[in-house]
Amino acid sequence: MALLSVDELSVTFTAKGRKDSTAVDGVSFDVDQGQVVGLVGESGCGKSVTSLALMGLLPGKGVRIGGRALFDGADLLSMSPAKRRDLRGSQLAMIFQDPLSSLNPVIPIGVQVTEILQRHRGLKGEAARKEAAHLLDRVGIPDPTRLKEYPHQLSGGMRQRALIAMAVACAPRMLIADEPTTALDVTIQAQILELLKELVDQEGTALLMITHDLGVVAGLCDQVNVLYAGRAVESAARRELFAHPTHPYAHGLLGSIPRLDAPRGEPLRPIRGSINDRIAWADGCAFAPRCDHYTMECLTGTPELTEPRAAGHQVRCVNPVLPKNQAEVSA
């Protein structure tokens, strides 16, 4: 059994007098110990809402959550708030996208780190301060005087490292990283990703990486789930996905970024339109209005996940982008 098994997770926001809005619509995936699984897609595809639902950080009112999320056999979605608080931070931790807004601006970094150590590990006083200094040193902040500084006194990279120190303070079995390299320069990005990779390799931590950066996916993830309009449209191992992107959306994401192995002068192929140009899944494929491969069959019902190319490579599309030789055989 996988450490985390998400089955048909759905999140719908409700408001009186307004139409319900479904942000996550039947997403399923597994994350095993020592594995890195990526959730990829444009902003608005449901990636961050998925992570907040798993952590129990969505509002108590105006939200309807369905499906199951088994963590070590226990369903996170039906767990009591008290039990989830005990789990969160000790066994299940999260690195948020914006460290400046995630850290308390009026409390020193050291107090915020030691608070976790006191709550989940029972450390107090000098023992907690020494462990907090050790954690900062472990994530690349060797100066213990930084414990007395406030978030605004640290650079963006240091704030992100402080968040990682807080997340790994109790050696959690599962770590969720919600775009942890956003707004950081390339050098700091590489350092943060290397740190996360070390945690997975050395501690056996399971990592759920949420990102829109396919470069991060290529260098870190083992399994990749591509989300669009709240549903997974393609799921495959990293090498398989990059070698043979099959859903037109995944194909478009890869075609819209520069490649070092592309011929000189070859233009990028961006996806036309925006995430708002979509139809309801109940009416067909949500990506159809932006797709260059759509047919009338795409508008006749909700496509299911199938394996048109290889075992374990799932695609939600009735007219997938097949490799040239396979397309010729199919014809």
Image (cartoon, rainbow, N blue to C red):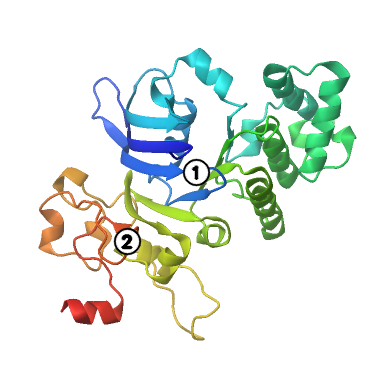
Report the side of 235 relative to 55 (left or right). Answer: left
Q: Secondary structure at mark 1?
A: loop
Which quarter of the image is occupied by the C terminus?
A: bottom left
When the figure is inspected, residue 105 is found, relative to residue 249, above or below; the finding is above
Alpha-carbon distance for marks 2 and 1?
A: 19 Å
What residue is drawn where x is 42% and y is 43%? 30
Which quarter of the image is occupied by the N terminus?
A: top left
* Residue at the bottom extreme, as displayed: 264
Closer to the camera in the image, 228 or 78: 78
On the question of residue 280 being in view, the answer is: no
The amino acid marked with disc number 2 is Ala
- Residue 141, percent from left and from top: 82, 42
Closer to the camera in the image, 213 or 265: 213
Tell me the tag on residue 32.
1
Q: Quadrant of residue 290?
A: bottom left
Tell me the tag on residue 252.
none
The amino acid marked with disc number 1 is Asp
Mark 2 / mark 1, whichever is N-terminal: 1
Q: Secondary structure at mark 2?
A: loop
- Residue 323, percent from left and from top: 31, 76
Are discs 2 and 1 less than 8 Å apart at CB?
A: no
What residue is drawn where x is 22% and y is 68%? 293
Report the side of 322 relative to 90 (left or right). Answer: left
Report the side of 151 relative to 289 (left or right). Answer: right
How many numbered marks have been drawn onto this rendered protein structure?
2
On the question of residue 51 being in view, the answer is: yes
- Judging by the rendered image, the residue that carries numbered circle 2 is 311
